Image: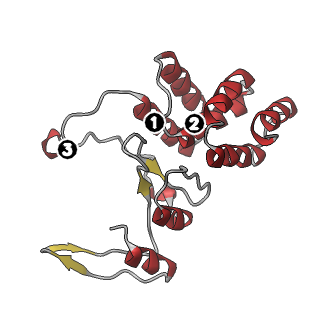
Amino acid sequence: MLNEDTVASVFAHEPQNYSNRRSIRTYPNSRNILVLSQPTPFSCVQVMDMRQVELSSKEDPRVVELAPFSEADQILFNEDFHVPPTIPFGSAPPAEWCYYFEKASYARQTGDWDEVLHLGEDAISRGFFAKDQIEWIPFLQAYAYAGNTTRLNEIASFMISDPLVFQQACQTLKEMQLDPSTVEKASQLFCAK
């Protein structure tokens, strides 16, 4: 549960303990967390990663505090994807923007930049766009690595409406190893404002 007690226990590095709520036994461990967030009902589910914290401007302040502790490397990459049972989860939602964003985020974590590019092109060709501008970051990185300055320009035009996210995009691009022409274009688009 995300509350002030949880935040305090993470900051205090409290050890694993036993919890019995309504006959549901758990062993929460504040030293070993993975934070998932959906900042608004229109946002996609986002996995926070302590190695590259990316925050929506609409993020809950408690998530902002905990994001630097989120260990995304707990995600098992060598496992098959599992479709949850229809009962009680319901049927799978249609493959719209969040489907592409979440697949691209996963591909980015595995270092599969070609797959991120493929997913970005597919999403854009189908007319899907982010409602939360932070969701452009995996695609921004893939297009930057590919040197696709046309797509960088398009993404900049979407992201500029959100100054916090735009600033994070600039910082992300500065930390990437890019060819000099892409660095120059990316700096002009995201860091010169």
Residue 147's tag is none
Residue at mark 2 to residue at mark 1: CA–CA distance: 13 Å
Q: What element does badge 1 sit on?
A: helix
Circle 2 crowding by C-alpha within 10 Å: few under 14, some 14–19, many from 20: many
Report x, y in % for residue 92: 26, 33
Dot 3 amino acid type: Phe
The answer to whether marks 1 and 3 mark residues whose Cβ atoms lie closer than 8 Å is: no
In the displayed structure, would residue 125 be above or below residue 78?
Answer: above
* Residue visible at 34% across and 40% down in the picture: 81
Q: Which residue position holds label 1?
A: 103
Report x, y in % for residue 102: 45, 39
Residue at mark 2 to residue at mark 3: CA–CA distance: 27 Å
Report x, y in % for residue 162: 61, 42
Q: Earlier in the sequence, mark 2 or mark 1?
A: 1
Q: Which residue position holds label 2?
A: 136
Give the quadrant of residue 24: bottom left
Q: Is residue 186 left or right of residue 97?
A: right
